[in-house]
Structure formats: C-alpha cells, structure tokens
Image (cartoon, grey):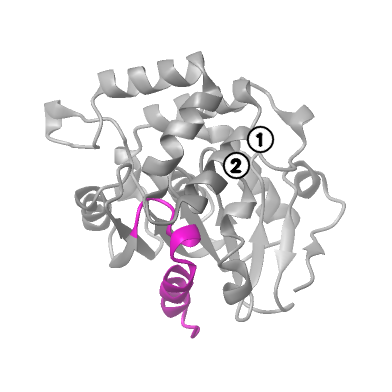
Amino acid sequence: MAVQHAGPGAASARNNVQVHGPVGAPVLVLLHGFGCDQGIWSRVVPILAEHHRVVLLDHVGAGRSELSAYDPARYSSLAGYVEDVLEVCAELELEDVTLVGHSIACVMAMQVAVLVPERVARLVLLAPSPSYVDHPEDGYEGGFSREDVDELLASLEDNYLAWSAAMAPALMGNAEQPALSEELAASFSVVEPGIARQFARVTFLTDARALLPQVTTPALVLQCVDDILAPPHVGLYVHERLVGSSLVRLSAHGHIPQVSAPTETAAAILAYTGATA
C-alpha cells in the first residue's frame, strides 16, 4: 500500500505525519503511547485503510519526528502532546474524525475531544488507564503504588536499555511469541533516553480521572486480558465514567493487542466505526 505524505505543513513535518487509505473515506487518527512510534500500528493499518483514511503521527521525540522540536517544558505534561495533535488536525483540516488512542495516548485523545468536540466524532480507547498509580484515599486501584512507580522510574533513570529489555516481555505478554517482545524492546531502544525518561514520568504520574466526566464524545473502550498496565477493573472504571461508552473485552493478552492480535483489534475498531473487516 502506498504511503502518502501529509504535505509540507509545519505540524505534519514535526510529527512525521503519514496518511494511508482512500481520499474521502472516514478518517481515523492513530495515536501511539510511551516507548514506541507510529510503527506500533503497522499490523492494523492495512486492514483499517481498506475502509478509512488513516492518519499516523510520531510524538515529538519518537520515530522520525523532528527531534529539534523537543522542548522539555512543552512536553513536561500531556498538554504539549495534545497541542501537537490539535495542530495536526487543524493543519490537515480534519473533521468528524475517530481518534484511536493506545495506552497513555487514550488520555491525549480524550483531552483533544474535550477541547475540540466539533472535530471528533468518536473515540477508541485501546488499553486505557486514567491513572497507573493507586489512590487509596478514594478507593481507586490503578495497579501500582506510588512507591512502585517511583522504583520503576528510578530503574529507568539508572539504565534505560536494561529497563526496556526487562519491561518489554511484561508489557507484550504472549510469552509463546518472544519475537514480539524483542520487537517492542527494539522500539524502546531507538527513543532518545533523556526524552524517554521524561515521557515515562509524564505517563506514569498522570492522573486524568477528573477528565472522564468531561468527555461527551461517544467512546469505545477496548480491554485486553492479563494487561499489567491496564487491568480489567481499570477498563471497567473508564467505561462506567464515560457517558454512553461501549466496552469490548478482547481475547488478546498483554498491553499491545495491535501487535499481538491485529486482526481482532482491527475488527473491533471497524465494527465500532460501522465498517466491516
């Protein structure tokens, strides 16, 4: 399938925007999470692009984005990444889009939908978590204590490559397919370590629980099996607090089903958008 470059616009160049699929088809914008780039979607894009115009981007600091655009202050929170997505959507004049977020990019997608609801028709939230940290004061269980997260971030600071090699199998799951974990570890390794450390801190310390009631855009929550970052009760938590949302439990294991179970993941997205796989 031919890849179409988005054009010479500043935002498109900064975020290495690539477009697949037929002109005039309904638009999907795919947002990747921590430790990877738009390549994480490569297995589902050919399926989705049969029915949709698929827009991909690399967050600044990842993939083939413009590394010179990285500003530690701008990207000290998710707000900088969200602003980038808003600029890409405006530059490409995207309307009535389906935003597909994975992992922490689910929060980005929801923030975009709150800020420009007129541009976003629906959300697909793949393995979402509004907070990875537990908040026992109000009964929320994100899966990690603050001490757990501090230890994780400290190990990442100490030796990023060793952390990547250790974390990739846990995140990918599917131990019977070690090549998938090796692929993820390789993806981690090409991110500039300093940027990866800051993005990790933003990712694991974000608390977006208060955002959920603000989202009025229809949403699909896709929940995986044995996901150490977004366990089933967290997916249910998100679903119950997004008005009018749908929850689909995939049979896929791990945190990255677009890699480990691309056919099932793509089929669930297409069913939600009204297309057929």
Residue 79 lies in what quarter of the image? top right
In the depicted structure, whether residue 29 falls above or below residue 11: below
**Residue at the spot of label 1:** 190
Q: Name the secondary structure under disc 1.
A: loop
Label 2 Cα neighbours within 10 Å, binned few <14 / some 14-19 / many ≥20: some
Residue 248 lies in what quarter of the image? bottom left
Q: Name the secondary structure under disc 2.
A: helix
Mark yes or no: residue 246 visible. Answer: yes
**Residue at the spot of label 2:** 187
**269 part of magenta stretch:** yes
Mark yes or no: residue 113 visible. Answer: no
How many numbered discs sit on the rendered protein?
A: 2
**Residue interval drawn in magenta:** 253-277
Q: Identify which residue is drawn at 38% across, 63% down.
A: 219
Task: Give the residue type that dot 2 points to.
Answer: Ser
**178 part of magenta stretch:** no
Q: Is residue 83 left or right of residue 259?
A: right
Q: State the predominant SS element of the stretch in magenta.
A: helix
Q: Nearer the viewer, residue 197 or 219?
A: 197
Q: Identify which residue is drawn at 31% across, 36% down.
A: 131
Task: Give the residue type that dot 1 points to.
Answer: Val
